[in-house]
Amino acid sequence: MTQDAVVVVPGIMGSELRDAETGDLLWGLSVRLLERAWRRGDGLKHLHVTPEELDGHTDRVRATCLLAKPAWAPFLLGIEPYADLVWTVEEAAAAPEAVRAFPYDWRLPVEHNGALLAAAARQHLEQWRAQVEENADLRALCEDRAPRLVFVAHSMGGLVTRAALAGEQDLIPDTRAVVTLGTPFLGAAKTAIILNGDRANPTPTLPPRRMQALAATLPGVHDLLPDYRCLDEGLEVARLSPETVGAIGGSKELAARAQEFQTRMRTTAPALPGHRAVVGVAQPTVQSLRIENGIVRARYEAFRAYADGELRRNADGVPERHDRAGDGTVYRDSASIGTPASMTYLPVQHGALAKHSTALRYVHAVLTEHDEHLGPPMGAGELGLVLPEEGVPAGQAWTLHVTGTTSPAGVICHVVDAATGRAIARPRLSGRDGGLAAQVTLPDAGLYRVGLESGGSAAVTQLVLAIAPEDVD
């Protein structure tokens, strides 16, 4: 076990939110809330950030706990709960009081939440140290050294942790390790697609439109915009400017604030102490973008550059492209900072990184290590899963795709109801377009989990929302 104080920090949309005055649930899994969020015209209005909140009056909404059950939002490939991660951390801790979950209002700026995390982490460490002093068994466990902090952070939670340590650098000597799971340190190109909404879809559905309207008001979403050159302009590659973000459906002002913050973190933030990055690989992931008539087009390739920043070009002067893949949301190189020895690669979807058994075993190993532990040996798993990001119509056939293999031998696909765990289907995979594909029909509107397993690779799972036919425009 570990004598350290551990703080678990979730990703975007991973904290339950309630109205601070009434206690009403604003975000978190309930069947009624999920239907209201994506099927009613004002279903997400209560989550929009108001002008008063942008001015610093942030007491309207209260983050109460980490997400305990799966949820779904368009483009984000499902939001998995954190119960397994918290349980793993508690199992490795000397006592339940050594573990603190840090829910936060993910709508607000990363820097704002970082300041709150710094204060909470300091308080947690001091309280745990005081408890250790009062208990003889705990004192014996800590005779070699005093307890320190360990942060275990998923996705945006890693950015919040970096902001906390950058803002309160006296925490750094008291921090033994930071484990990040799929954190987009250089941002995620998919954020621009979220802010663009359903403009690229010839048969739009309600959820993407509502997600775009919400995201356009959220500083937290703008903090996830790519902080690297990702805009394909033919013979050049550019960064997304605040003006461009405003033109595609986001907020120019929030994008400018986010860009200033990202630059500060990139250039002045200290290295994360004892950092271990769990990086998702092998999943088809948006890495760059092209904008045509106000529509953001996803590109599943990154651009290569030399050490001085000059683009690598082929003999015709065209920038070289290379598919680096990722976890389906965050592309590989965005989640990778530090040295290669500090990274562990898993062929897992973004939402599942905080609940996948191999990732959980790795977190447990870091918490309980005595010497430097660089991660478990990984298999050669290269299976990727591609589902429609905007949801699928209930009662109608749609196609799922599997990448990384052309043979269905040994590959098992299954679909279960995410709320009940009831088996729904076992789609039959067959070769198509250099990979595998299967037709799936989900019987009713609701949230489902698609799983993909093979004896030679880690399991891949992804959530998909089935939308009632009357809700499809």
Image (cartoon, helix red, strand yellow):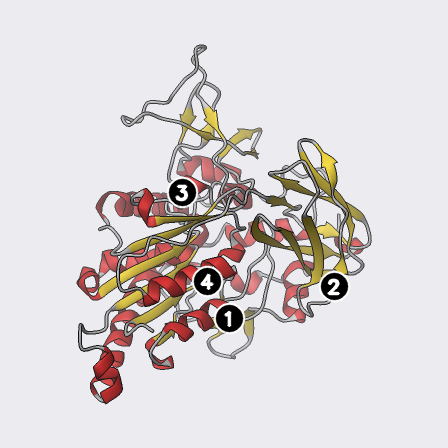
Q: At 53% across and 30% down in the image, what residue appears?
A: 291
Q: Is residue 345 left or right of residue 160?
A: right
Residue 216 image offset from top left, x and y in percent:
50, 49
Q: Quadrant of residue 70?
A: bottom right
Q: Name the residue under label 4.
A: 360
**Which tag, 3 or 2, sits closer to the chain's start?**
3
Q: Residues within 10 Å of mark 4 (few under 14, many from 20)?
A: some
Disc nearest the viewer among 3 and 4: 4
Numbered badge on residue 83:
1
SS label for mark 3: helix
Residue 367 image offset from top left, x and y in percent:
34, 66
Q: Name the residue under label 2.
A: 423
Numbered badge on residue 334:
3
SS label for mark 1: helix
Q: In this view, does 123 lie above or below 377?
A: below
Disc nearest the viewer among 3 and 2: 2
| C-alpha separation, residue under disc 3 versus residue under disc 2 | 35 Å
User: Residues at badges 1 and 3 in contact (C-beta under 8 Å)?
Assistant: no
**Which tag, 4 or 2, sits closer to the chain's start?**
4
Q: At 41% across and 17% down in the image, what residue appears?
A: 313
Disc nearest the viewer among 1 and 4: 4
